[in-house]
């Protein structure tokens, strides 16, 4: 179980939410409503108050890098700290399988500056999955992708769910929210409210 308890920042919250293992919860809302800020607070990337627990283990009781391996945030615009794609991955069969899953099997030989926004999105997902996180915080993971690439990413999300990974998905795509999310939430002015399934 992934539990968010009275989480707040100057712009978001307080937010409380429990998500079961293998569940995907969708989060929609207007630009500027606080969706990305909520994910950043959960990942402990921005100052925040409250608590977040994974299987009853508090985020506050472990080093931040350890938490972020367990609870991985994939932002809409990912960061890359060297020029070569290969520098961001551990080489081996597992990486090859992840890159194939996102449709970029040859990308280890590429330079980061040649990547499109959509390629960066897919590679950032593969990079995060290498650490086998228990929770994925996905911020518009298909916003720059065509239909085929979107299908690939959604297939990966479903497979992660089948393996028990908890997913919080931020998306503006209502159809995608319906395809992937079991429960649906709306964020307005930093506050979270559940949307009835019939209205999602």
Image (tube, rainbow, N blue to C red):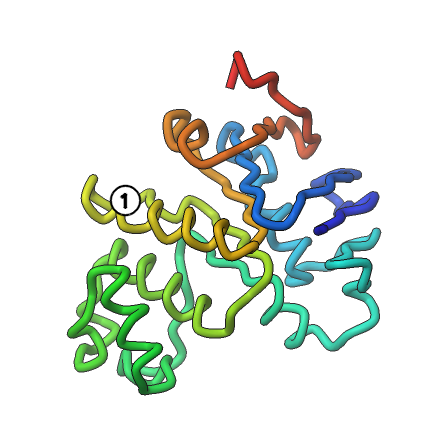
Residue at the disc numbered 1? 150
- Nearest the viewer among 130 and 110 is 130
Q: With respect to residue 42, does 199 lie above or below? A: above
Q: Residue at x 64, y 76 (%)?
A: 65
Residue 18: quadrant of the picture: top right
Graded by Cα atoms within 10 Å as few (under 14), some (14 to 19) or many (20 or more), the crowding at tag 1 reads some
Q: Residue at x 42, y 68 (%)?
A: 79
Q: Circle 1 sits in a helix, a strand or a loop, which is it? A: helix
Residue 19: quadrant of the picture: top right
Q: Residue at x 53, y 12 (%)?
A: 198
**Rendered location of residue 140, percent (x, y):** 42, 44
- Nearest the viewer among 35 and 109 is 109
**Rendered location of residue 15, percent (x, y):** 76, 39
- Residue placed furthest toward the front: 162
Residue 118: quadrant of the picture: bottom left
- Residue placed furthest toward the top: 198
14 displayed left or right of 103: right
Q: With respect to residue 177, does 128 lie above or below? A: below
Q: Residue at x 64, y 62 (%)?
A: 45
Q: With respect to residue 37, does 177 lie above or below? A: above
181 displayed left or right of 84: right
């Amino acid at each position: 179980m992934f539990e968010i308890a009275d989480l707040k920042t100057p712009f978001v919250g307080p937010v409380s939410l429990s998500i079961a293992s293998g569940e995907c919860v969708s989060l929609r809302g207007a630009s500027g409503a606080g969706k990305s800020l909520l994910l950043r607070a959960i990942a402990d990337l921005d100052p925040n108050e409250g608590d977040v627990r994974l299987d009853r283990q508090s985020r506050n009781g472990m080093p931040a890098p350890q938490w972020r391996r367990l609870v991985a945030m994939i932002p809409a615009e990912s960061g890359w700290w060297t020029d070569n794609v290969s520098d961001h991955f551990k080489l081996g069969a597992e990486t090859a399988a992840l890159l194939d899953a996102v449709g970029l099997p040859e990308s280890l030989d590429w330079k980061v500056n040649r990547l499109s926004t959509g390629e960066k999105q897919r590679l950032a997902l593969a990079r995060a999955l290498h650490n086998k996180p228990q929770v994925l915080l996905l911020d518009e993971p298909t916003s720059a992708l065509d239909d085929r690439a979107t299908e690939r990413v959604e297939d990966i999300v479903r497979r992660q769910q089948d393996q028990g990974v908890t997913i919080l998905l931020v998306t503006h795509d209502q159809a995608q929210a319906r395809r992937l999310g079991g429960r649906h939430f709306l964020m307005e002015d930093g506050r979270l409210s559940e949307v009835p399934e019939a209205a999602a």
